[in-house]
Image (spheres, rainbow, N blue to C red):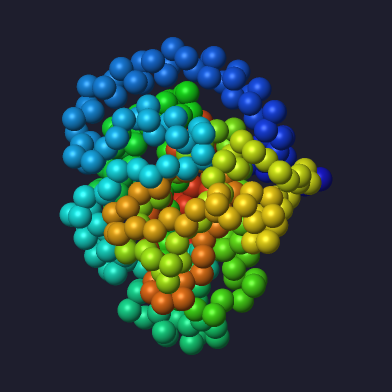
Amino acid sequence: MAIISRYKLMRGLLKRRTIRKIVWDVIRTIKRRELTEFQEKLSTIDNQSAFNETKPSAESIVSALELEGAVRGPTLPNKYVEYLIDFAKRTPCYADRVPAKGFYLHDRQLAEQKLGKKLLLAQYFNLHKDALIEKLSRDPFLLSVAAKYLQAPPQLMSINMWWTFPVEASQEDKAKHAHVFHYDLDDVKFVKFFFYLTDVDEGAGPHVYVKGSNKNIKYKNSLFKSKRFTDQEIRDAYGDENIIHVLGKAGSCLIEDTITLHKGITPTESSRLILQFEYSINTYAEISCITNESECKIFV
């Protein structure tokens, strides 16, 4: 008899927004004292944030996040962007998120030759082992926003960073790498911080979200499988005015609860590098972006 993992069980049980709301209300009641203690400790290190020069208030961010599902966040200082670009060049990334298909960025063409296809996406693993990235994941401002939104002490679910390349991608690759409209169900409540590490215009594959679709839900799903949506279905349901293309310079930030409908656009002109921190109430190994290093191989 097959055993259903905690992650799959959670996804099956929490498909309905009403159920998620009930479970969240119970959790935040239980976690109230723990949250207060966490926020008090956080206030003592608030001045250590990397975002002190650009950050809005956590209250204003959470208010917008609850209303629209996503909101612009503070800019990542240039020194961090430069470090992360250098890190991306000197650290192996992994074709199609497969640990056995590692390569260095300068060998991308060789990787494509070996794969027999143009490569849409390459991801990095085990980013928590880099001291600067790990420190950013504990930034007081990010944690304060996450705590206020989750109404519980935030857990670091994952640190993710990936390249998206300008290619004629197959429909299979577009679906596999979230280039069709969908929503995430990563926990009862969760929030993600996306940082562009390269300039992103319409030719660089911007992130797209559907404003208000975190609350205005116009779809149904089966118990364990989430549906993908066509562009036309989204336009018909929500209107073009609510489909937001997130453009910005390197360092730009978007904070999003990705229960909100969203997708990536396949780049047509230039590559996009993005860093993501995800915080949640519970954590699941399936989406941690941590893998056994013995499984990570350079294949070119």
Spot the residue most to the right: 1
Residue 261 horizontal side relative to residue 226, left or right:
left
Residue plotted at (35% across, 74% down):
105
Could you say where residue 124 lies in the image, as x and y percent from the top left?
Answer: 41, 61
The quadrant the N terminus occupies is top right
Q: Is residue 219 above or below residue 263?
A: above
Residue 160 horizontal side relative to residue 168, left or right:
left
Can the viewer see residue 268 in this picture? yes
Could you say where residue 245 lies in the image, as x and y percent from the top left?
Answer: 47, 57
Which image quadrant is residue 156 in? top left
Residue plotted at (61% across, 36% down):
215
Which image quadrant is residue 285 in? top right
The quadrant the C terminus occupies is bottom left
Q: Is residue 179 above or below residue 155?
A: below
Q: Is residue 151 above or below residue 94?
A: above
Residue plotted at (39% across, 58% down):
247
Could you say where residue 22 lies in the image, as x and y percent from the top left?
Answer: 66, 22
